[in-house]
Image (cartoon, rainbow, N blue to C red):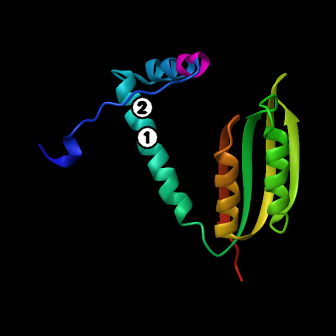
Amino acid sequence: MTLDNELSRIGISLPKHLLDRFDEIINYRGYSSRSEGIRDAIRSYIQYYKWMSDVKGNRQGVITMIYDHEQRGLLVTLTDIQHEYKAIIQASLHSQISENRCLEVILLRGDGTLLKALAERMMSQKGVESVKLTTIELED
């Protein structure tokens, strides 16, 4: 058996609502099992990470973020992070999605490594559901 075919078992803990939503998606898409859906999700995550690692040079970008504003300390942390990166943030827009969920859109301009660093900092915070960074290279 080659290394690519070796399987490892892992255990993960997920909130029920997240697992229920994942099950709905894998059933809709016709996956044979949760494991197959998780493998596909991990492959997508790895591909996105590779794409993010190519974000270099002078860029224009946007971060879209969904988070739980009731998560203890999250609002202060997100604000502090944005203040650290104020040199590349052009504007932000905040929208209430539901009673406890918010959508934030942040327009960015600057060095791609800084845009990526900001997105990764936000992505790693507990209570942040999703962060998507989209960028384009600026012509000189």
Observer-nearest residue: 85 or 11?
11
Q: Position of residue 84 (x, y in %)?
A: 81, 62
Q: Quadrant of residue 62?
A: bottom right
Residue drawn at x 88%, y 57% is 91
Q: Nearer the viewer, residue 39 or 80?
A: 80
Left or right position of 18 against 67: left
Q: Position of residue 21 (x, y in %)?
A: 56, 20
The picture quadrant where one finds residue 58 is: bottom right
Residue type, mark 2 in image: Ile
Estimate how packed mark 1 is, as few (under 14), some (14 to 19) or many (20 or more) residues with alpha carbons within 10 Å. Answer: few
Q: Farthest residue in the front direction?
A: 73
Residue 74: x %, y % from top left: 79, 39
Kindly check if marks 2 and 1 are in contact, taking CB atoms under 8 A apart as contact.
yes
- Tag 1, which secondary structure? helix
Magenta segment, prevailing SS (helix, strand or loop): helix
Q: How many marks?
A: 2
Other-residue count near label 2 (Cα within 10 Å), few / some / many at <14 / 14–19 / ≥20 = some
| Residue designated by label 2 | 38
Q: Which residue does the image show at 72% across and 60% down from the upper left?
A: 61
Question: Which span is picked out in magenta?
Answer: 16-20
Quarter occupied by the N terminus: top left
Residue drawn where x is 46% and y is 44% of the image: 44
Look at mark 1 in the image and give the residue it sits on: 42
